[in-house]
Amino acid sequence: MLTERLRAGELTLMLGIRSGRTTDIVHIAHSTGHHAIMVDLEHSTMPVDTAAMICAASVDLGLVPFVRRPEQDYGVVGRMLDCGAMGIIAPRIETAEQARELVAACKFPPLGHRSAIGTLPIVEFRSMPVGDFNGLMNSATIVKVLIESPLGVQNIRAIAAVPGVDLIGIGTNDLTAEMGVPGQYRNSDVRRAHEVALAACRDLGKPLVIGGIADPAYAAELIRMGAAPFLFTGIDTDLLLGAVRDRIRQSLASINA
């Protein structure tokens, strides 16, 4: 399971999908050694049907499909989980109550209140006793809360302690903006927020992913300090832009040689 990989300190790669609209992007993720994908419904206009097909293809290839829901949108959570998503990423969680509401939407009773369904793609639509099925789905569904504000950091210990929260993330880009120091990853207050989060999650035995840092050396330092080695390799739009720029530079260099 992905969370067990992270607890064991195994490097885990995730590709973000925002502009891809076919399952080709999943095959690219698979062929380049990724372990997971993240379908970004927060920052895209991707239809739910398309996101569902991408998630299903990911499961077939053995990758863990996460979906980042639009902020405060609970309606999409159950539909994406029913269609093959194995993880939900919820942006801007700031309180334990918000975390409990998220778990309630993602997990079947007794952990939550996810609406009952007969079977799902992850078990190849086989029939199972309800109790066994609910327990299996609860253990297979990863609930990741994303902390992106000072209030979230202040409450991170209570948030991480909520039963059913499996993974905690710090969105440092948003956090620095909220703190009035946009992009200043090494700011002393930002560093202190990272240290507070690391201590809380270490005490509670929950993996902490610290992302949104464009400074590879600092990101590596945080992993050495105990952050989970969950590497977000990039979003498909940005990676395509970089590849096109590189190709143009190579072509111009050849012509001008």
Image (cartoon, rainbow, N blue to C red):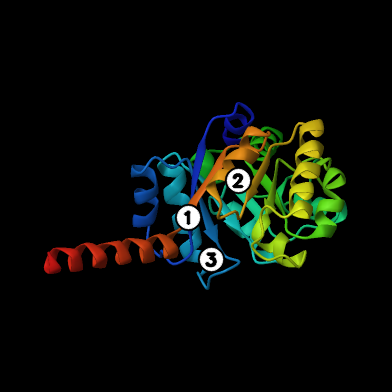
- Give the SS element for disc 2: helix
Q: Residues within 10 Å of mark 2 (few under 14, many from 20)?
A: few
Front in this rendered view, residue 245 or 121: 245
C-alpha span from label 3 to label 2:
36 Å
Q: Which mark is residue 218?
A: 2
Say the numbered circle drawn on residue 48: 3
State the residue at coordinates (81%, 38%).
200
Question: Residue 167 appears at what percent x and percent y?
Answer: 69, 42
Dot 1 falls on a residue whose secondary structure is strand
Are the residues tagged 1 and 2 within 8 Å (C-beta)? no
Amino acid on which disc 2 is placed: Tyr
Q: CA distance from mark 1 to mark 2?
A: 17 Å
Residue type highlighted by circle 1: Gly
Please tell me whether mark 3 sits on a helix, a strand or a loop: helix
Determine whether, in the image, residue 96 is placed left or right of residue 78.
right
Q: Which numbered marker is on residue 234?
A: 1
The front one of 29 and 64 is: 29
Q: Position of residue 256 (x, y in %)?
A: 14, 69
Left/right of residue 253 with respect to residue 178 in the rendered view: left
Mark 3, Cα crowd under 10 Å, few <14 / some 14-19 / many 20+, is: some
Task: List the single residue furthest toward the front.
Answer: 257
- Coordinates of residue 149 in the picture (x, y in percent): 78, 60
Relative horizontal placement of residue 97, taking residue 18 as reference (left or right): right
Mark 3 and mark 1: span between their CA atoms? 22 Å
Q: Examine the image and state in which quarter residue 68 appears.
A: bottom right
Q: Earlier in the sequence, mark 3 or mark 2?
A: 3
The mark lying in front, picked from 3 and 2, is 2
